[in-house]
Image: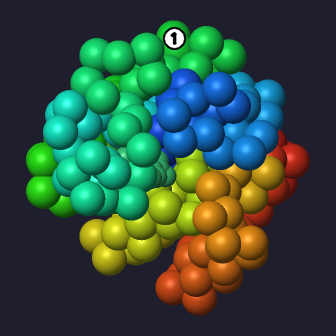
């Protein structure tokens, strides 16, 4: 990959308790990403994170007829960032999924993320976080649609895998749409 520079931002997608083992919507081995995420953080001048931030009766929740258990309710422990993440490195937090009626998978949907990135002069977004097959996927695809380059760090993401292979499929889809797939070592070497 092209070496990291001023026009790159690291975007940590939903590094939250509810997506880690013990959480309401646990991603298998979701907490195993943090070693690599923490190695990536100091390499970037711009670091942002998204935070899934749902109202209590969000339409994606099972009691409301949605697909997911209740998760990442605004202000709850489950919605907080996992303590293994080094929080002092996160410069801006973009809360998403606030609107009751939309799934809020993408960090760009109904948020100021694109504007914030443009204000910083960012042209390329490097993505890590949770979960590969939902919010990382949606955010990477919308980054491309918004005119940013997108890079996905494959050993700093983890998938829900509701159906086996969903994570692999999502990576293939992101790559087919124009995203570059790299591993942490490749980013750090740049
Ligand atoms: C996510 C399902 C529901 C994610 C968020 O962060 O990938 N997945 N809400
Ligand atoms: Zn959610």
- Residue 43 in which image quadrant: top right
Residue at label 1?
88
Task: Classify mark 1: residues with Cα within 10 Å, few (<14), some (14-19) or many (20+).
Answer: few
Q: Quadrant of the N terminus?
A: bottom right
How far across and how far down the image is residue 48, in percent? 42, 34
How far across and how far down the image is residue 189, in percent? 85, 47
Outermost residue toward the bottom in this view: 176
- Horizontal side of 116 relative to 189 (left or right) equals left
- Horizontal side of 37 relative to 120 (left or right) equals right
Q: Is residue 125 above or below residue 120?
A: below
x 42%, y 66%: residue:
138
x 79%, y 51%: residue:
155
Viewer can see residue 121: no
Q: Nearer the viewer, residue 179 or 156?
A: 156
Q: Is residue 26 above or below residue 157?
A: above
- Circle 1 sits in a helix, a strand or a loop, which is it? helix
x 61%, y 74%: residue:
170
Q: Nearer the viewer, residue 7 or 129?
A: 129
x 69%, y 31%: residue:
21
Q: Specify the color scheme.
A: rainbow
Q: Nearer the viewer, residue 22 or 80?
A: 22
């Amino acid at each position: 990959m092209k070496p990291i520079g001023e026009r790159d931002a690291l975007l940590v997608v939903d590094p939250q308790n509810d997506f880690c083992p013990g959480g309401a919507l646990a991603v298998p081995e979701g907490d195993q990403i943090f070693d690599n995420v923490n190695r990536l953080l100091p390499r970037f001048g711009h670091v942002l994170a998204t935070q899934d931030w749902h109202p209590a009766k969000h339409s994606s929740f099972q009691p409301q007829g949605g697909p997911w258990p209740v998760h990442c309710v605004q202000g709850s422990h489950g919605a907080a960032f996992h303590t293994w993440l080094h929080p002092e490195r996160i410069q801006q937090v973009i809360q998403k999924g606030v609107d009751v009626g939309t799934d809020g998978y993408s960090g760009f949907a109904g948020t100021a993320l694109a504007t914030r990135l443009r204000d910083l002069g960012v042209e390329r977004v490097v993505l890590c976080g949770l979960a590969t097959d939902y919010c990382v996927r949606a955010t990477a695809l919308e980054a491309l649609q918004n005119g940013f380059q997108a890079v996905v760090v494959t050993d700093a993401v983890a998938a829900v895998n509701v159906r086996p292979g969903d994570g692999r499929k999502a990576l293939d889809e992101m790559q087919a749409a124009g995203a570059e797939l790299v591993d942490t070592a490749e980013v750090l070497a740049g």
